[in-house]
């Protein structure tokens, strides 16, 4: 019995499978040869014994790459498929510069991002500095002031509010109740001493009785000898401007003035409006037709027009000039406190309008830098926060309508400031 399936035996002449009419094994079929361009013709295959043709394996022609071994997609440069996907694409194994399977280096990316941000911040800051520095009006030459007191460890500023109407339209003058007087006079004056032992702000009433010393004219260069003339302090400014005012303050106090800053009516009001108003707690209601003041007691936000009326009011108070200087100190400290906050400094929509409004009308001495201005504002802010003293110049009486300083207290006050000590002198 034959165990082989039907049609299968050892006889090579027997049938080789069902359905085959040929007792011979089929020979290998020869595929049509396609000649690739640039490839030399091949010899026809030779038949092997037994009827099979020996077809040798051929590799691809030189310089040819089918792309099958790499997964490369036709028409995609660098081995990437449509849209940059596929092997070799972004974030996939085989990307240049990163071994397959390796995660992105986020620390490196964060470092590069931080550097870019730092460069942007520095560039903006430098640009802002030069923009602001170019707006400052350095018009006062303290080099013209003669016979000056010795320097000390404190930085002392003379801050002046003038009644200048420069740049104001007739409508603005009417709105701000400034009148239309020509020229300018000092409407307020104060000394700000920024010291290590604490900051001190001393208001100088414009009706203060002072002596005009020997001085050199700021415009003429002519020397004017001392004549023992006693006048109101604001007369010094009216006679020969900021330089004579500084000379008179130094002569009558013994304090050296390091920097001078002056702002007019319009600049003051514009700064307040640029900040969006300044919040102030007014302890008692008052009105003044001349300044336009009309305030109720309590916390309220003052716009530029209201702020100017507040600091100019004098006729609503019994001690007109002294009460007004106290209001001026209070408001300027509140203004500085609000201006020198992160909400203003890092907000370009507040910073640039505020700086633009103030610097256009701010007049300072030729040696005053933006850093000196910043120190001045932060010193004023420190006084509001309780880090310092705010007071009027001590008064002992009056002479012909002029307020006479208490010389004993003035000397002690000046000594404490010069020695960088905490001020303990009181105004009364």
Image: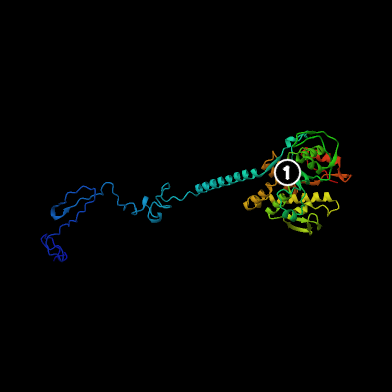
| Residue 254, x across and y down, in percent | 80, 37
Q: Quadrant of residue 414?
A: top right
Secondary structure under tag 1 reads strand
Residue at image mark 1: 261
| Residue 366, x across and y down, in percent | 69, 39
| Residue 274, x across and y down, in percent | 68, 53
Q: Quadrant of residue 255?
A: top right
Colour scheme of the picture: rainbow
Q: Residue at x 65, y 45 (%)?
A: 135
Q: Quadrant of residue 125?
A: top right
- Residue 385 shows in the view: no
Q: Could you say which is closer to the camera, residue 410 or residue 354?
A: 354
| Residue 129, x across and y down, in percent | 62, 44
Q: Is residue 152 above or below residue 168?
A: above
Q: Could you say which is closer to the camera, residue 277 or residue 224?
A: 224
Quadrant the N terminus occupies: bottom left
Q: Residues within 10 Å of mark 1 (few under 14, many from 20)?
A: many
- Residue 49 shows in the view: yes
Q: Residue at x 19, y 52 (%)?
A: 55
Q: Could you say which is closer to the camera, residue 207 or residue 374?
A: 207
| Total residue callouts | 1
């Amino acid at each position: 019995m034959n165990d082989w399936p039907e049609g299968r035996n050892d006889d090579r002449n027997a049938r080789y499978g069902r359905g085959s009419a040929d007792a011979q094994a089929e020979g290998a079929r020869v595929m049509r040869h396609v000649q690739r361009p640039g490839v030399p013709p091949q010899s026809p295959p030779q038949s092997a014994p037994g009827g099979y043709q020996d077809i040798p394996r051929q590799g691809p022609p030189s310089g040819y790459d089918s792309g099958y071994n790499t997964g490369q997609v036709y028409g995609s440069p660098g081995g990437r498929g449509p849209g940059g996907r596929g092997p070799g694409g972004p974030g996939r194994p085989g990307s240049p510069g990163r071994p397959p399977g390796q995660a992105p280096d986020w620390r490196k990316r964060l470092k590069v991002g931080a550097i870019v941000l730092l460069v942007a911040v520095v560039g903006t800051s430098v640009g802002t500095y030069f923009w602001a520095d170019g707006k400052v009006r350095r018009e006062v030459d303290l080099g013209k002031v003669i016979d000056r007191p010795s320097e000390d460890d404190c930085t002392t500023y003379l801050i002046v509010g003038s009644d200048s109407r420069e740049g104001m339209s007739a409508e603005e003058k009417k709105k701000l109740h400034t009148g239309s007087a020509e020229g300018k006079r000092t409407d307020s004056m104060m000394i700000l001493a920024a010291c290590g032992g604490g900051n001190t702000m001393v208001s100088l009433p414009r009706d203060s009785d002072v002596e005009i010393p020997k001085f050199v004219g700021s415009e003429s260069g002519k020397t004017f000898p001392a004549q023992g003339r006693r006048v109101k302090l604001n007369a010094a400014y009216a006679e020969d401007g900021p330089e004579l005012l500084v000379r008179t303050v130094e002569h009558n106090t013994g304090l050296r003035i390091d920097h001078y800053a002056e702002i007019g009516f319009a600049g003051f009001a514009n700064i307040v409006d640029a900040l969006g108003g300044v919040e102030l707690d007014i302890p008692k209601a008052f009105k003044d037709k001349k300044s336009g003041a009309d305030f109720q007691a309590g916390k309220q936000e003052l716009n530029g027009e209201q702020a100017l009326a507040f600091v100019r009011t004098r006729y609503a108070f019994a001690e007109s000039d002294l009460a007004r200087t106290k209001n001026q100190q209070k408001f300027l400290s509140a203004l500085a406190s609000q201006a020198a906050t992160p909400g203003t400094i890092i907000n370009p929509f507040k910073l640039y309008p505020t700086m633009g409004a103030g610097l256009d009308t701010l007049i300072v001495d030729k040696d005053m830098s933006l850093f000196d201005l910043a120190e001045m504002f932060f010193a004023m802010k420190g006084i509001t926060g309780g880090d310092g003293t705010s007071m009027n110049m001590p008064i002992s009486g009056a002479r012909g309508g002029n307020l006479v300083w208490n010389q004993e207290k003035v000397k002690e006050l000046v000594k404490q400031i010069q020695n960088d000590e905490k001020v303990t002198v009181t105004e009364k």
